[in-house]
Every structure is written in structure tokens, then in C-alpha cells.
Image: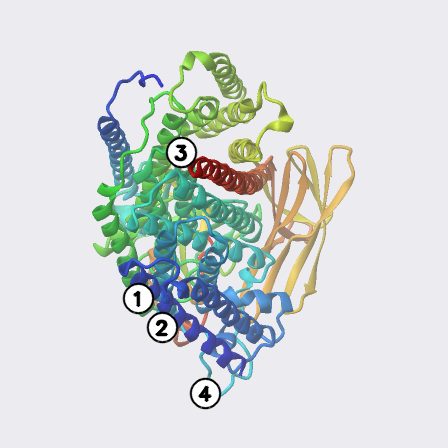
Amino acid sequence: MIAEIGLAALWLAAALAALQLFAGVLALRQNQDEDGELARLVRPAAMVQALLASLAFLMLMWCFAITDLSVKLVAANSHSLKPILYKVTGTWGNHEGSMLLWVAVMAMSGGLIGWLEKRLPVRTMQATLATQGFVALGFYAFLLLSSNPFERLPIPAPEGQGLNPLLQDIGLALHPPTLYIGYVGLSVAFSFAIGALLTRNVTPEFARVMRPWVLGAWVFLTLGITAGSYWAYYELGWGGWWFWDPVENASLMPWLAATALLHSTSVLAARDALRTWTIMLGVVAFSMSMLGTFLVRSGVLTSVHAFAVDPERGSFILALLAIYIGGSLAIFALRAGTVAEGKRFAMTSREGALVFNNVMLSAILGIVLLGTLYPLLTEAFDIRVSVGPPYFNPVSAIFAVPMFLVMAAGPLMRWREDKPARIQLELAIVGAIILGVLAVVAVLGDYSILAILGLALSAGLAIASFMPLRGRKLARVPLATWGMVLAHFGVAVSLFGMASESAFTTERLSAVTAGESQQVAGWNITLESVDPIAGPNWTAMEARVIAQRGKGEASVMVPQARNFWAPAQATSESALLTRWDGQLYAVIGDSAGVDANGNQRWQLRVWWKPFVTFIWYGGLLIALGGALAIIGRVSTDLKRRRAVLRGTEKRAEAEQLKMEKIDGYGTF
Amino acid sequence: MTEISTGLRAKHQRMVLVVIAIVAVIAAGLLAAYALRNQANFFYLPEQMSANPPETGKAVRLGGMVQPGSLQTLDDGITVAFVVTGNEAATIPVRYSGILPDLFVEGSGVVADGSLQENGTFLATNLLAKHDENYVPRELEGLEQHKSPEQSYTTTMYTD
């Protein structure tokens, strides 16, 4: 019954998306305003659609929570003995469930703008919601026609097949939902862009409306990527935090586009420049989300994220991709000419710096895109290629380094036109810090060029990010400016973590017997014992490792080598010890035979990773900065609108008085 | 309001911006194409590696099957030696120091990151093995019979 309610809700939601599309289009064609009968339906359709899609998602969650084995999806991906947390999070740990989450988020973003966003002209709003309905409709069709999550089995399965053990982790509760809110939330930017283009309303006012929504999606995308990176880092047991895996790139590409978008939106809002470029980025950002969905969901990539391989689904998503990306680019090509020229600015100005970094971000996006798609292209010609860090790291750095340099100076510059001489002191300080760190690190050790550059740039950027506050009364600095400062500082922090991890990590791999000690980077590591233990759906060999730093307090680490039995699979559970200046990372491996005295030996791999945690602290700071900017922007905008409203009322009153006076004279 | 010092007319400024953006993106594209062409040599099958070996010390990827009976742990307890074979007779001896990936067994596929040494041994720094019964690294598809009837049911994955 539960599954049927879910399915019915999903069909109804799809019908409402269709209504939202047709009502919006008809209202636009008939040139109606909000009073038109059809036009009045657009907003409620979006809101009810959001409720129904959420209901469908909750119903699927329920099926998973009670392990309803008559539902095919549950039987294929869950198990009655799984801990309840993983039963519930397992809802989106599979293809159909995650696509349902996708459309649910899509519907909720549409419902939210339908409910809350009252600032846009009526026609632009109708076009926006119609676009949102149009995109959602395609994905409802995909879900209902080729990936029905509520399909029943003719005979209920006696037991489920279990969830991939790597996914049985708290990370599954955090990473996919936040990532999807960001990923799919960008659909709002897409719909706004198309809506503004269709109704010829690309104005600063429009940019101010779109900005908080873009920022919101971007904040969640940042959090989702950060969570995913940390999850991969501790779950996979290889000590790496970013693998340039195609699915990681699939999340990075929309982030790069959204980062460029929110900066160009700022230029449009503040200075009425970069109109077409902003619209273009709005289209590109969500296109990247859809491309990522295609890469991850179609099975063209074999990956932990590509739950199952099915060519029919791949072609379905590819067709959707062609319709939406092709269609939006066609609209863009047809309408871009009608967008009037924005304001001018000099190259040395805040706008100039933002434009430069927008171009750099786009170039990096292009590089990641080519590197991700290239193996798929060569495969068509039967040449197998692996594209990995040797390509991505140096090639993207060529554009990232100038971007970071300009990012340090940009916020110090004035809008419209500025003379570099005005901020030469600041530039000199930042330049000196960068060169100083560069020299010191290069002299002290033999590190990779990228790591040295990363350390130097992060130091300069960290200082530069606070310079816009210099000489200002801190209490009176707008919240949005604090947001920018924090987010830029977060980039520096994250960059420092990445560079430090790659430059200073020390590693110790050894076969040790119980009681044996070894040293890594000032830590004394002793293997105390290795014992078999059992969990709810796994058994494991658990090592007790005592870690002591110098004469400090000893801590216990318990890395495990787990064997799950549903499905049968082995995983390494790493053990982490976090200190302010880094993390100790331990993994236990196989039994390594016996030593000369006949004692059992175990493989133990320990890393000391200085400041590696800064990578994720930086990500959190960036997201926090984004959140502050949203609060700041929305509250000033509301204040401004109230003031304008009061102003108009006052003027109207004054006008009235004047008129009465004139009338009074007139009677004479 | 003073005139902007560059004195560009609005239309011109837009053109300049568009040209700069296009130049940068084309530069990125060319750079990527150049780097990717070098990357084409990144992946080797054993027969390719023995016929046309990469420079010693260059970071490449080797993919093939772990020859049954070849896997042995050396005395230090952490270094393993095994032989990788492909579709043809060529074999490449591999050494790897580290914890073997889960489900790394003889007779199954492996992709090794590392470099060829002067003595003809491939020194692996990282092994990507299959991580569940049904999964085969993409580069190795077609090397072994891996399809099983329940595959469409089971989750496949790639931890890298």
C-alpha cells in the first residue's frame, strides 16, 4: 500500500509539472498578468508538486525503513538485519532511489521559489516556473518509465541482497542529500536565466533576486563535495582525499560553474554589467549538473556511484540532456542579441578582476570536462586511456595560479575603475608573503612545484582575504562582506591543507608482531593486539594500536579489516587520530606470515598527514561564508524594498496633499 | 561622471571581453588536448609494455590479470611480487609494497599505478583491484569472463 501511495504521488507530481509548464507557457503567450485564470495556477502547481514529490520520497523511505521485501528496489538493495540508519539512508544508496531524491529536490526548489519569491515581475516568474516544470517533467518521465522505484516483485523476496558495505556509513546520510540539494538546486539558476531571457528582463534587479538562490545551491554543493571528499578519505583506506575520479569531476564541474555564476551575478547586481555572461553561466551551471547526472547514472562510467549498468537508462538521460542543454543553448543563441549592453568598466577594476577569474574558472571547467570525457571518446575508437592526476593537477594549476593571484587583489579594488597604485602597499605585502614563503619552502625541502606554489599562495591569500576589512569599523561591515572574507579565507585554508598534505605527508608501512613498535614523524606506534570481532552484519579483525607523540599521552586507534556477509565483501576501516596540526591515519592489512621467532605478523600502514584536516575546514568556511552572504543580501534587500515602499507611499501622500492644495486653489 | 580612461565604446568593450574569453578557453582547450595526447600513453597492457616499454621511472598505469601461482609475499612481510599477464604471452613482473586491496587474488584483474624499473620490473605505488565479485576495472573489460546473471541486481563500484 505504501509503495502504491508513493507511485500515485509521483504520477500526480508529474502531472502537476506538466500543468505548471502548460499554464506558464499559455499565460506567457496570451500576455496575461497574474489575474489570468491559467496564470494563477502556476505557483500553486509548483508548491503542490513539491509536496507530492516529497511525499513519494517519504513513502520510499518508509518502505526501506520497514524493509518491505515485496518492493523490488528494497529487496535488491537492503537487508532486514542492517542497522536502521543504513536502512533509511539506503533509500538513496541505489539508482532509482537517488533519482527520486533528484526529482524531489528539483520539485522542492521549484516549490520554494513559487512560494517565497515575490520580487520578480509576474511574467518572468511564470517563465521561470514553466522552465522548472519543463525540466522536472523530463526527469519524472525518466523515473516513471525506466526507473520506477516502487516496482513490486511478483513474489516477495525472503531476504534482501544488502547494501554495498562501503556505503554503510554515516557519510551516506550526509553526502548525497547535501550534494543533491546543491546540484539540483542549480536548476533554479537555470530556470531564472531562461525565464529572464524569454521575457527580456536581464536587469540588476533580476540578479539581486537570483543571487540568494544561486548562493544557497552553491553552499550545499560546497558542503556536499566537502563531505564526499572526507568520506572517501576515511572510508577507502588509501589515505587520499581526491582521486580525479569522473564522478568527483561530475560534482566539481557544476561547482566551478556556480562559483563563476555567483561572482558574475554580483557584478550584474552591483554594476549592471556582464548581463549575457551571467545568463550563459546560469545555463552552463545546471547543464553541468545534468551532464554529471548522465555520467554517474547512465553507467558509462564504472564507479562506486554508478549503482548498476543499464544502457536503456543511459540513452534516456542522454536524450534529456540533448533536449535541455541543446534547447537552452538554442534559446540563448536566439535571444542573447536582445540583451542590451551593460555598463562599461576599466580592466583594472573590481569588475575586471571578477571577469578575469570568471574566465579562469571557465578554463579550469573546460580542462576538467575534457579530461573527464576524453577516455569515453577514445573508447569509441577502441583505445583505452586513463586520465589521472598527472593530467589534471598541472594543467588546471596553469589557470588556478593566476586565478588565486587575482583573487588576492580583486576584493581590494574599486568598482568601475581603479589605479593599481592606490593599493600598492597591500599588493606589496601580499607579494612579499608569497615570495617569502616560496623561497623558504623551496630552500627547506625537496617538494613538488605545485605543493610549494600552493603553500605560498595560501599564505598570501589568507592575509589578502582579510585586507578588505582594513580601515573599516568592523561592527559596520555588512554581513555579505564578512561572507566574502570568510569564503576567500576558506579557499586559502583549504589550499593550505591540500599543499601541506601533498608536501609533508610521511608514511610507514611495515609487518609487525603484537607488541612491536615503530616510529613515524615523531609518533611512536605500537601494535598491541589483533582480535576477531563481530558487528551487526560483519565480522572483522580489529587491531589495537597505541599511538604516542613524544612523551605525550598515549591514544588507542582501532583500525579494522571487515568482512561483510550481505553482500559478501571486504572493506578496510581506517582509524583516525586528529590533532590540531594534522591527522594520524592507520590501516590494518592482511596477516603477513610469521617472523623468525614464529610470532604472527600483521601489515600495518600508518600515515602522518600534517594539516590535512584544513582541506575540509576550508570547505566548511567557504560554505559558512556563503551562508552569511545569503543572510546579508536577503536582509538588506528586504530593508531596501521596505524603504522604497515607504518612500513611494510618502511621495504619494505628498502628491495627494499637493493635489488637494492645487484643487483648493482651483476652486477659487 | 568622467569618461572611463580606456575610452572604449560599449560595443568595443563587449567585443574585447568576448575575444579575451574565447582566447583563454581555446588556450585551455589546446593545452588540454596537448596534455591528453601525452596521456594516451598512460595506460599499458602487458603486451604493449613489453613491446614498447615506457621510459624507466615515468609514471604509467599497467593493467592485466594476476597470473595464478605467481603471487608471493617477500620476507619483509609487506612487499608482494606477482606477474601480470594480458591476452597474449607477454608477462610483466610487478612489485608492490603496501596493503593489498580487498579481493586482490590471483587470476583476477588488477590495474597498477607505478613505473617501470631498469631491470624490467614494474614498481607499483598503488593497486586498483576489483572491489567486489562482479566489478572489473574499466580498462580490463574483455580480459576475463566476468558477467554473472545476478549482476544487474548487485551494486558495482570503483573505489578510486
Look at mark 2 in the image and give the residue it sits on. Answer: A146
Q: Real-space Cα distance between discs 2 and 1?
A: 8 Å
Q: Earlier in the sequence, mark 3 or mark 2?
A: 2
Look at mark 3 in the image and give the residue it sits on. Answer: A267
**In the image shown, does B44 or A505 lie closer to the viewer?**
A505
Establish whether labels 2 and 1 are both on one chain: yes
Q: Which mark is residue A624?
A: none
Is the residue under label 3 in contact with that under label 1 (CB below 8 Å)?
Answer: no
Q: Quadrant of the C terminus of chain A?
A: top left
In front of the other: label 3 or label 4?
A: 3
Look at mark 4 in the image and give the residue it sits on. Answer: A154
Q: Which amino acid, by three-letter code, is at mark 4? A: Pro
Q: Secondary structure at mark 2?
A: helix
Q: Which amino acid, by three-letter code, is at mark 1? A: Phe
In front of the other: label 2 or label 4?
A: 2
Q: Real-space Cα distance between discs 3 and 2?
A: 42 Å
Q: Secondary structure at mark 3?
A: helix
Residue A653 in sight in this render = yes
Is the residue A30 above or below the residue A512 in the image?
below
Look at mark 1 in the image and give the residue it sits on. Answer: A316
Q: Real-space Cα distance between discs 1 and 3?
A: 38 Å
Subunit under mark 3: A
